[in-house]
Amino acid sequence: MKYIGNSFQMHRDGVLDIYRKYNIDSKIENEWLNEYYSELIEKLKSSESPDIFWLICEVIKATKSTNKMEYLMDILNLCIVNWDSFERLRIAEEIQELIEFFSKNYNEQSSEILKYKNIALDIFNSVIHEQVVISEDTRQKVSLENTLSEENLRIRAVNGLRDLLKY
């Protein structure tokens, strides 16, 4: 599932024409994405790292499913307590992207979207007001130390909060 149905990325890598030759029905593609989503959710539940979260968000965008987003948000509440400030900030920023995606592309302004917005607002506020904690794992993954500075994280959280309040 390298491309998660993204024809732009397939084209960029020069494999779109080959893929199209197989003439795969969109229903089959959706089944694949649904199976992949389920696998990723199970991995997220058993993982102490949020790295899988971003793949799940890509599947949600590809399937255009607010139902999948709702389920992810329910699971997220269980997982996020184990993640450091930088990871939580990145999660809030990704939720913000999902909200923008559904709001702009599908004119979605449902109560679910409001719920996700509140989740992201809570996460941004926690990064702003709580002690910043960075795990050793995050320090090893992120090469630019300034990226992990308390000041930088708080600025990003304030900007995310401000931008999210526009929706």
Image (cartoon, rainbow, N blue to C red):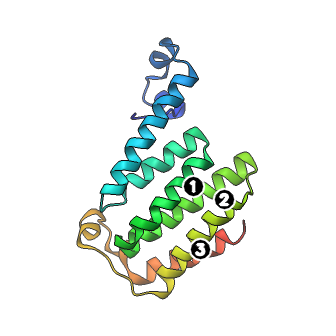
Q: Which mark is residue 70?
A: 1
- Image quarter in which the N terminus is found: top left
How packed mark 2 is, by other alpha carbons closer than 10 Å (few <14, some 14-19, many 20 or more), is some
Residue 132 pos. (x, y %): 38, 83
Q: Amino acid at mark 2?
A: Glu
- Decide which of tag 1 and tag 2 comes sooner along the chain: 1
Residue 159 pos. (x, y %): 59, 74
Q: CA distance from mark 1 to mark 3?
A: 16 Å
In what element is the residue under mark 1? helix
- Image quarter in which the C terminus is found: bottom right
Residue closer to the observer: 28 or 159: 28
- Residue that label 2 marks: 112
Residue closer to the observer: 163 or 1: 1
Left or right: where 129 falls relative to 42: right
Asked whether disc 1 touches disc 2, contact meaning CB atoms under 8 Å apart, the reply is yes
Measuring 50% from the left and 27% from the top, which residue is drawn there?
A: 11
Position of residue 46 relative to residue 39, above or below, is below
Measuring 49% from the left and 81% from the top, which residue is drawn there?
A: 126
Residue 5 pos. (x, y %): 50, 32
Q: Amino acid at mark 1?
A: Glu
- Decide which of tag 3 and tag 2 comes sooner along the chain: 2
How packed mark 3 is, by other alpha carbons closer than 10 Å (few <14, some 14-19, many 20 or more), is many
Q: Amino acid at mark 3?
A: Leu
Residue closer to the observer: 14 or 165: 165
Q: Which mark is residue 121?
A: 3
